[in-house]
């Protein structure tokens, strides 16, 4: 433990504390001391990308990065968080699970009890809420009226200017109660995580291939059986996302996302078959090739 305490003070590993087989976030440190510096021995990658040219270089790598400047043309007036939770929890297409605790998911469906709770208590409870069918809320008078024109269009225009095309690009809400979060998992999509309320710690790996080689990651069975390995603090690439922040999460790379000590909400944009000048990134090219050989495992429209 002495060694762990030293890590926490020396400025690079202060945000993690070992517990059993995994390292647990300590939100007291996360909120005040920021993100660990990258060890000099690992491949350098930008922590943040602010120009289209920078994005064109970084998008096909393996490491997550912040989106800022012209890479984050995101603005919209969302309802206040309590109202948003209430609107979403009432909808029949919502998913509400007990949720993750530092990357370990409790998949219990708690929709019924979460809907019954007084809103203030629901917001402070442990939950992980997701909603994938947001076009239900696009109509006149609904809370996402104008969202396509004000959020999706500017983002897609940015991608088009960069020479990108895609087969799917759609938004998803992810909300979590204090200390709640996602499983340790990887997505078959490129994801922009746009933080709206509260703070989330978005943790990925500095060397994803070392823990999840690409030839395994393309397989459904591998992804379903994925569990969080024992990780040293220096092996984790974590970003604290505060309201207004945006992050690019690389396709097929393991990650987990936790709220800190207050409820948190992000809106993610999910992309599939994203090509630049007609070319997929290496991770998605491997996935696409695998899916051609195993069409039964290929993406099915979930919306
Ligand atoms: Fe994810």
Image (cartoon, rainbow, N blue to C red):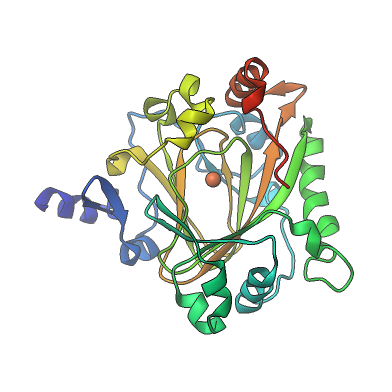
- Whether residue 218 is visible here, answered yes or no, is yes
Placement of 74 over or under 262, stated as above or below: above
- For ligand 1, the image quadrant comes to top right
Position of residue 24 measured from the top left corner of the image (x, y, whole percent): 30, 54
- Please tell me in which quadrant of the rendered image residue 79 appears: bottom right
Placement of 181 over or under 184, stated as above or below: below
Judge from the rendering whether residue 80 lies leftward or rightward of residue 122; answer left or right: right
Position of residue 182 measured from the top left corner of the image (x, y, whole percent): 47, 53
Position of residue 219 measured from the top left corner of the image (x, y, whole percent): 52, 25
Determine the residue positioned at 78% across, 66% down. 144
Placement of 233 over or under 240, stated as above or below: above
- Please tell me in which quadrant of the rendered image residue 244 appears: bottom right
Determine the residue positioned at 46% across, 72% down. 262
| Residue furthest out toward the right | 140
Judge from the rendering whether residue 244 lies leftward or rightward of residue 236; answer left or right: right
| Residue furthest out toward the front | 112
Determine the residue positioned at 60% across, 28% down. 60
- Whether residue 202 is visible here, answered yes or no, is no
């Amino acid at each position: 433990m002495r060694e762990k305490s030293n890590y926490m003070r020396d400025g690079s590993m202060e945000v993690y504390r070992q517990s059993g087989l995994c390292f647990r976030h300590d939100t007291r440190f996360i909120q005040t001391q920021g993100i660990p510096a990258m060890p000099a021995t690992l491949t350098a990658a930008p922590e943040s990308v602010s120009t289209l040219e920078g994005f064109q270089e970084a998008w096909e790598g393996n490491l997550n990065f912040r989106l800022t400047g012209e890479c984050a043309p995101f603005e919209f007036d969302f309802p206040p968080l309590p109202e948003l939770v209430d609107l979403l929890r009432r909808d029949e297409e919502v998913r509400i699970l007990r949720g993750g605790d530092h990357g370990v998911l409790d998949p219990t469906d708690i929709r019924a009890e979460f809907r019954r709770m007084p809103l203030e208590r629901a917001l402070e409870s442990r939950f992980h809420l997701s909603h994938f069918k947001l076009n239900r809320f696009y109509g006149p008078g609904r809370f996402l009226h104008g969202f396509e024109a004000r959020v999706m269009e500017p983002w897609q225009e940015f991608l088009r200017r960069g020479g990108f095309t895609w087969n799917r690009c759609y938004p998803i809400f992810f909300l979590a109660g204090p200390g709640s979060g996602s499983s340790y998992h990887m997505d078959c999509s490129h994801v922009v995580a746009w933080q709206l309320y509260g703070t989330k710690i978005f943790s990925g790996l500095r060397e994803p291939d070392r823990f999840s080689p690409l030839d395994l990651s393309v397989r459904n069975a591998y992804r379903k059986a994925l569990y969080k390995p024992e990780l040293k603090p220096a092996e984790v690439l974590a970003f604290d996302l505060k309201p207004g922040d945006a992050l690019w999460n690389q396709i097929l790379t393991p990650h987990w996302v936790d709220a800190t000590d207050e409820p948190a909400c992000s809106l993610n944009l999910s992309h599939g078959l994203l090509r630049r000048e007609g070319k997929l990134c290496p991770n998605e090219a491997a996935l696409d090739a695998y899916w051609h050989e195993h069409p039964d495992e290929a993406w099915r429209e979930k919306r």
